[in-house]
Each structure stands twice: as C-alpha cells, then as structure tokens.
Image: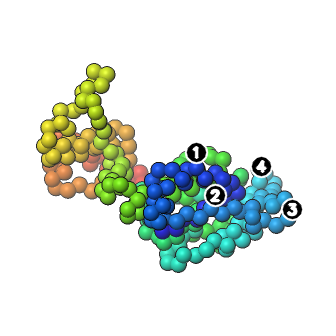
Amino acid sequence: MRIDLLSIFPDFFTTPLNEGIIRRARQAQIIDIGIHNIRDHAEGRHQMTDDRPYGGGEGMVMKAEPLTACLRAVPSCGGKRRVILLSPRGVPFSQEQALRYAGHDQLILICGRYEGVDERFSERFVDEECSIGDYVLSGGELAALVVTDAVCRLLPGALGCADSAERDSFSRSLLKHNQYTRPPVFADLEVPAVLLSGDHAAVARHRFVESVRLTLARRPDLLAGLNLSREERKTLKEEGLLAQVEYAAMAGQMGRQA
C-alpha cells in the first residue's frame, strides 16, 4: 500500500514516520509513504499557498492552484485510490473507516490549514473529508499521522502478532479488557487470580466480561454496533449484564438514527 501526505510543513512527518510500527512496515515494504511539499507547487517568489477569503472574514484560505498542482504531481501506484482532506468538518474517523481505507492501494491525505481550503478544489478533486475529533488543531498534519498509523497497523505483516489488530479496542465495538504483567503484586494490588490459573476458557470469559463492563461504564455508545453470539449472550445473562447491554445498544442505535 502507498500513502501520500500533502502538507506545507513536510518536515512535520520526519520523526513520527521513522519510529515504531510504521518504520518497520516501511522497511519491510509493506507500506510506502510519500511526503509532498505543497509550497513547491506554488507560483511566485514567495510561494504563497494561501490568500484572503472572498467576502471577508478572519484568517486565510488555502489556494486551489498549488493544491491541485501538488496533487497532480503525486505518482499513481495504480489500483484503488482515495483522496482524503483532513478537515474539522469531515466525517469522524473510526476503526471502521480505518479498515475501509486499508482496503485501498493508495491513500492521498491532504493536510488542511488556516480557515480551510478553496471549496472548488474540494469539490473537484477530494473524495471525502475526514476529522479525527471535535476539537481544533493548527492543521491536518497530526490528523494525517493518526490516520496513517491506524491504517498501517491493519496491513498484513505490519504487527508482530497477526491477531493483535483483530483484538484491539474498537475492533468489535468493545473497549479492551484491563492488562497486567509482572510482578503479580504491585502497590498492594494483585493480578486477578483467574489470569494466573492457566484455564484459557476462564481467562477468555473473564476478559470478555471485563471488556463489556468497561464499555458500559465508559463508552456505552459503542454497544450499538455490538453483535453477540449465543454463548456470549448466555455469559452476559449469567453475569447480570445482558439487560444493560441491550438497553445501551438500543439507546445507541436511536442516537445514531437521530
């Protein structure tokens, strides 16, 4: 897979893309990442990429011409391509979106800045807008890194453990269970005995129930997308949690429809 990042601050990506999972995935040629400086495609001695908005108002707007020229200069790797503008008015990013993006051969992530980009560029060249949350950032670079990391870890071979991505938080509308490691006692707190029992079925049940409890307490909205097997429903009924989960799921579905 290839990801291309378009920004007026290309050096922003230098260190993050050369660390951890992304670095290993690049070295293993699982992912190819290109960084493109939008200023290189701006005309004039000052390489201006922004201008005042028509109609007046605060701030500056990114110009359509350098954005278009930079986008056209991005090499195509063939196959399925998606052009995404990182923008606060985009669809909220989710694990579901990350999975969808990972199914493409090439993603082009455009880092918005200032008060936004000229709408004519978005209308003509952008496939979708994406936001990583309801808060304000100085630009789309941090958002582009979030998307890149989330997508990269879903690519086959990117993680050391093949099952890790499937068991991450949000992979099935549940937060991940609590984790413990050595020593067995720390600050007078003990690791749950079931995790030391060696009983794999009991451990799996404990972790599932704990994930449900955590999700109910912290992110009940996620349960709207949870599909339970017959055995899981039986387990939750035995733990006195099934009614709470069903209520939270129904409330979440109504909230989504609203």
Q: Amino acid at mark 1?
A: Tyr
Q: Is residue 115 left or right of residue 248?
A: right
Q: Which residue is mark 1?
A: 135
Q: Residue at x 24, y 43 (%)?
A: 207
* Residue 151 point in image, percent of width and height: 46, 59
Q: Amino acid at mark 4?
A: Glu
Give the distance between the C-alpha atoms of the residues marked 4 and 2, in whole angstroms: 20 Å
Q: Residue at x 34, y 38 (%)?
A: 217
Q: Residues within 10 Å of mark 1 (few under 14, many from 20)?
A: few
Quick one: label 1 or label 3, which is nearer the N terminus?
Answer: 3
Q: Which residue is mark 2?
A: 111
Quick one: label 2 or label 3, which is nearer the N terminus?
Answer: 3
Give the distance between the C-alpha atoms of the residues marked 4 and 3, in whole angstroms: 25 Å
Q: Residue at x 43, y 69 (%)?
A: 103
Element under disc 2: strand
Q: Which residue is mark 4?
A: 58
Q: Is residue 146 above or below residue 182?
A: below
- The reply to whether callout 4 and callout 2 are in contact (CB within 8 Å) is no
Give the distance between the C-alpha atoms of the residues marked 1 and 3, in whole angstroms: 35 Å
The C terminus lies in quadrant: bottom left
Q: Is residue 12 left or right of residue 99?
A: right
